[in-house]
Amino acid sequence: MEAETVQDSQDAVPAPGREAIPLMRAREGDGSEASTHSPLLGSSVAGTASGSMVKTASIIVLCALAFGVGIFLGPTKAAGSDGGDEGLESVVGGFSLPSWMPFVPHAETNTTTSSTTTSSTGTFTTATRTVSSTTRTTFTKTTFTTTSMTKTSKTTTSQTMTTTPRYPRGRFSCLSDMNLGPVKHPDKKGIAMDDTTFSKCPSLTAVQWPNAQENISSLRLFKAWDANWEADRLEAWKALKEYIVSSGVKVLYGTQISCNETADDTDWLFVKELMIYIGRPHVMGVAVGNEVELLHTQKTCSKKCAEDMWDGGYFLSKVMHRANDLNAMPGFADVRLTTVMGGFVLGGQPFVNTKEARVHEFFKKINANFGRRWAWSWNTYPYFDPHIVMDKGPWHTCSRAMMAAINFAPSSMLPGQLRALRTRMQQVTGNGDDTMWLTETGWSYPRASTLSTVMRNCAEWSTSEAFALYYQGFLEWDLGLGPNVRGLDHAFFFTLRDSVNFGDKENFGLIRSCRSRGCKMKHEDRSVVP
């Protein structure tokens, strides 16, 4: 760095950005002795009257100061230009700080970019680097510094913060140190998609079974969309299609049956559009209605609606209409049809046949119209079974009920009920090998707010241990129903994430929420993974 000549004159004009004070100037004395004053060193430097000595001292001081300033400015230049792994440095408040220091809190994905420009006595050094990190924000910091020989500086800093999506689209599987696999017959088992996953994070639909190493092969959708969801429908569908196509998943589509015909028809339009958008190769079937036999128990269902649903022929006519629409859609004429019902239908022989739920008559007409195209679908939950009782005694235990409910042996509750349903199916169709699907089963941990049986008084019923045992039993189940009885053709576990059902919180999910990276079950104490 070259020293700069400074004129000691009243007319001297200061250099831009610097003060009009010489680095070192002779202070007039009594003529025989001159003293020199340095604005940096403060105290006077004594010298002889000899001009050569004064000049020599001035030169020595000037060189020393120039050397010192070079050292002061050197690290900034070097750090900005070496291109190595060390972070850039920025001059902040007179101190040199490395750029890797956390100016903002680090989060979970993206890039940090720093740019520093330093000007000192006519010399410019520019450095720009991009450093990859594991933060979820992009942080840009630009610093401009002007420094004079008098150690005066001006620093301006600007910061730009941009946020990327917290969970970018991609193949997702939850994390856990607990392995509950293997999955037996993975090609015949699937997961039911809850409203939370569909409406808030469809791109985070799990590729693999939580706590297992097998890919999920099928998905049950209860609806194609809900007008009450605040999410962008097309964006959600795009993410869902990306998951289904990339994973080779088959989908059982559901369409609603209610007391509102306009809403039912609108829902069906969405289902048709989504099926066409995703493609025929990924269609497993279409379920028209979900537990319609229980519609009369809902507060929103009037007496007239319940009568029209069955004796008025509304339900059957809608099934026929949906089938005709599929027949008219190129490539969809062979799509399997079904409706989903539960254990309530066992209240009659062979099925319940009351004015509020004329299920037997309905199935006879269905069999006459569709025959083998029809799949018989059932929801079965030992967790909610109203017939189970507490153990005898004052201890409020339920060990016997637990043994019957959480295992999948032929003599246990779930296979036993499904075996009874297949027997009733045969009484309608005359066949012992009709297609039979289990469209929902699962367990709740923590306890579901909708649990209204005596099992509310059993502390063990809704524990993490019970949840893990039931889920593991499902994964290892061979779908058999006992000797001399045809087993299931397919089974769905409910559900991927905890969700709300008609305003009530339920905890049947294998993952807690869209914000959870971990599976609900982990090895240590089988507790919840955040």
Image (tube, rainbow, N blue to C red):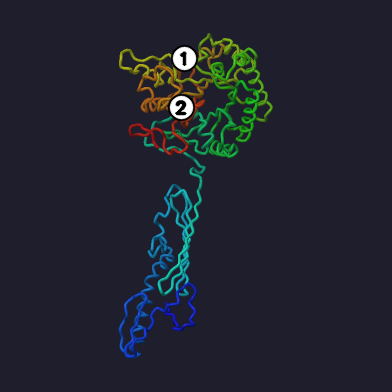
Q: Which residue is mark 2?
A: 506
Which image quarter holds the C terminus? Answer: top left
Of the residues tagged 2 and 1, which is closer to the observer?
Answer: 2
Dot 2, crowdedness within 10 Å: few (<14), some or many (≥20)?
many
Dot 1, crowdedness within 10 Å: few (<14), some or many (≥20)?
few
Helix or strand or loop: what does disc 2 sit on? strand
Residue 287 seen from this side: yes
**Residue at the top extreme, as displayed:** 349
Q: Which mark is residue 484?
A: 1
In space, the residues marked 2 and 1 are separated at their CA atoms by 37 Å
Above or below residue 11? Residue 516 is above
Which residue is drawn at the image coordinates 45% and 18% (left, top)? 481
Above or below residue 280? Residue 164 is below
* Residue 171, x across and y down, in percent: 49, 40
Residue 225 seen from this side: no
Answer with the quarter of the image where residue 25 lies.
bottom left
* Residue 316, x across and y down, in percent: 63, 17
**Amino acid residing under circle 1:** Asn
- Say left or right for 141 vs 322: left
Helix or strand or loop: what does disc 1 sit on? loop
